[in-house]
Amino acid sequence: MSDAAPESAERDPVVPKRRGKVRKRHTVGKVLLASVLVLAMVTGLGTIWLYRHLSGNLNGIDITSQLENRPDKFAVTGPQEPLNVLVMGSDSRDCAGCNIDNLTGGGQRSDTTILFHLSADRERAYGISIPRDLLVDRPDCKAQDGSTIPGADNVMWNEAFGLGGPACTIQQFEQLTGIRLDHFVVVNFEGFQGMVDAIGGVEVCIPEPIVDPSHGINIPAGTRKIKGKEALNYVRERYVVGNGSDIGRMKRQQAFIASMAHQVVTAGTLARPDHLLRFLDAATKSLTVDKGFDNLVDITKLGIQFKNIGLDNIQFITIPNVPDPADPNRLVWKQPEAKQVWKKIAHDEPLTKKLSDDVISAGNVPGSGSPSSSGNGGKNEADKQALEDAGLCT
């Protein structure tokens, strides 16, 4: 049986936060803000056509009727409300190029779940990964036809997505963490490959060759850019890299996303309208989102609010976990640390160093050799071990 799920945080008095000095950096917001203007001016594409085209790519669905007993949001201090977006990677075998494991059966599977939390002052962002092998007590949830999908005890986290798609995963997340979600995004692997290819690949640092004959994977060691099927293989591989665990695979995915964000913001993507158009086209085609997040205007407005978030303040961690005493191949929440993480996120409080030992920031990706100005560049032994277990350069 898994550990008890974290309870919703009690309403504590909020202490006003002291605002730190804002760094003038390239930001994620600038990418979204400048995209349409740059493309319209440089390529001659009309802004109205471009808006309609990219917004038309997005697949918006309404799942509000499928969600029940949703937690309340806590009042916090800030010019905006904190924002919580649940990103789910669809491990579907049905789209072209998605079935890289050559598995049968089709359908959608949950390969990745990451909560992205944006602070109310829009000065920090966390990406918190939840292992698919985590054992939880899954609550009841509603199917699209209104019928009830019964819950179950001591089952893997990703089972909810397979049974009921994003709605059941969101129901599970909110009930087990006490955090109210604002939006959700489902991304498939076909679109992921398109985004990587559109920016000319993503730089990775691999200390040893990745050779997995059973899955046709052979990736040389070194620091270089990878794209196409090789990039998909890199973020999916879990059998012969590092310690061969799902946690290691997630850490590799975090580093890959961080490197991808770093490249989009700093590597001249905005200066290449052809690259930018391909990136945005691939990104919007690959996404399924909620109805409140299904047009480019909504996404661009959100981008405006990110102007104070530098790359060093976009940080990725994994929710604290330990092996299940009854099955070392499965995981359970590590208590009280997991509960403390969710409580701090619910109250929009910064995570302490104790709760984020294995942090990766978009400003200091593994193997970059550039220390993070946020102070996370000096890795301790726990950080180094986490990177080694993931098969990343330290």
Image (cartoon, rainbow, N blue to C red):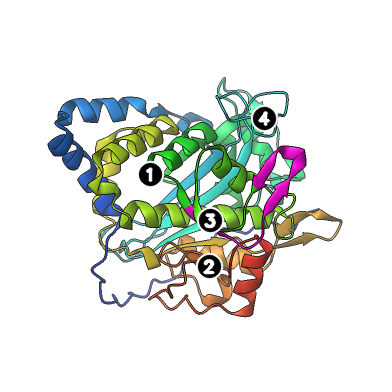
Q: Is residue 151 left or right of residue 371?
A: right
Neighbours of disc 1 within 10 Å: few (<14), some (14-19), many (20+): many
- Measured in 3D between alpha carbons, the distance from the residue under mark 4 to the one under mark 2, in whole angstroms, is 36 Å
Counting from the top left corner in percent of width and height, residue 158 is at: 66, 41
Image quadrant of residue 189? top right
Residue placed under numbered mark 1 in the picture: 199
Among the two numbered marks 1 and 3 on one chain, the one whose residue lies closer to the N terminus: 1
Task: Look at label 4 and name its amino acid.
Answer: Ile
Residue 254: give its label: 3
Dot 4 and dot 2 residues touching (CB under 8 Å) = no
- Measured in 3D between alpha carbons, the distance from the residue under mark 1 to the one under mark 4, in whole angstroms, is 41 Å
Under circle 3, the secondary element is helix
Which mark is in front, 4 or 2?
2
Which mark is in front, 1 or 3?
1
Which mark is in front, 3 or 4?
3
Neighbours of disc 3 within 10 Å: few (<14), some (14-19), many (20+): many
- Measured in 3D between alpha carbons, the distance from the residue under mark 1 to the one under mark 2, in whole angstroms, is 25 Å
Q: Residue at coordinates 63% horizontally, 44% vertically from top-left?
A: 236
Q: Residue at coordinates 52% horizontally, 66% vertically from top-left?
A: 367
Counting from the top left corner in percent of width and height, residue 278 is at: 34, 35
Which mark is in front, 1 or 2?
1
Dot 2 and dot 3 residues touching (CB under 8 Å) = no
Task: Look at label 2 and name its amino acid.
Answer: Val
Residue placed under numbered mark 2 in the picture: 359
Foreground residue among 371 and 219 = 219
Counting from the top left corner in percent of width and height, residue 106 is at: 66, 24
Q: Which residues are magenta?
A: 203-218
Q: Name the residue at the right extreme.
A: 326
Foreground residue among 282 and 352 = 282
Among the two numbered marks 2 and 3 on one chain, the one whose residue lies closer to the N terminus: 3
